[in-house]
Image (spheres, rainbow, N blue to C red):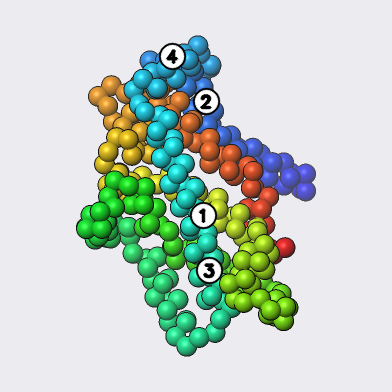
Amino acid sequence: MKKFGTGAIHFFLITVSIVSLFPFAWMLIGMTNSSAEVIKGKFSFGAEFSNNVAKLLEMTNLGTAFWNSTLIAVVGTIATLILSSMAGFGFEIYRTRGKDRLFGVLMLSMMMPFAAIMIPLFRMFSKMGLLDTPAAAILPSITTAFMIFFFMQNTKSFPRELLQAGRVDGLNEWSLFARVYMPTMKPTYAAAAIITFMNYWNNFLWPLIALQSQDKKTLPLVVSSLSSSYSPDYGVIMVAIVVTTLPTLLIFFLLQKQFVQGMLGSVK
């Protein structure tokens, strides 16, 4: 029975792995085939990769879109990590009257769908003159209730003795945060960086509204424009999807160890 149970578990895991990896395999194979071959369901590598890349570069301003996505994702991730960790640190470390009520109101914001605030956001950024700028894509997500909650929960395992020792050594609160808290919470920052970077990189709805010029478009918007044409070239679309996917995969594989530690709430 034990061998049967182990075999069943392995069979289940192999099946789930195949189902999970099949779309990526299809994507990699599809970018080497022509659009007609992709439509026919050809599941073998072809000889159209160079042609698909040339068509993609001809049809889109891929370099500019890649730079826009990188700028928004990197700047937004750094700003979000700093501000959200400061808020999570403050909520957990400092005891003030009304803190729990304020945090409860903050949590309620997670229940509000983004579609409900799109029009107010658009009017606000329009009046501020920030539409069609990277700031318009970064600022609405620069602090989120989830990320503040994530840092707050992980800060519960932060050793308070380090703060006391820092205060004895003469460090002020800002120095404690920058020189004691941040280095100690590296796994948490790594996990938050992956989540935040992916959110910024894959964000579609708000950039579609806020970024109106062609030279301000991000990669998800470029991929969407390719697929919305009258006769989409699926080989070219597959190449664009691979280009869009690679940075997030790279970030995850580089930080996967810290990501697991951060999600488990470990502190080093």
Q: Quadrant of residue 211?
A: top left
Disc 4 residue type? Asn
Q: Nearer the viewer, mark 4 or mark 3?
A: 3
CA–CA distance in space, label 2 to label 3: 41 Å
The kind of residue tagged 2 is: Leu
Q: Spatial distance from mark 2 to mark 1, Cα to Cα?
A: 31 Å
Could you give the CA–CA distance between mark 1 and mark 4, rounded to whole angstroms? 37 Å
The label on residue 28 is 2
Query: Which residue matches tag 3?
Result: 86
The number of numbered discs placed on residues in the rendered structure image is 4
Within 10 Å of disc 3 (Cα), the crowding (few <14, some 14-19, many 20+) is: some
**Crowding near the residue tagged with mark 4, few <14, some 14–19, many ≥20 C-alpha atoms within 10 Å:** some
Q: Amino acid at mark 1?
A: Ile
Question: Which labelled disc corresponds to residue 51?
Answer: 4
Which one is in front, 101 or 178?
178
Q: Give the farthest residue toward the front.
A: 170
The residue shown at (59%, 76%) is: 173
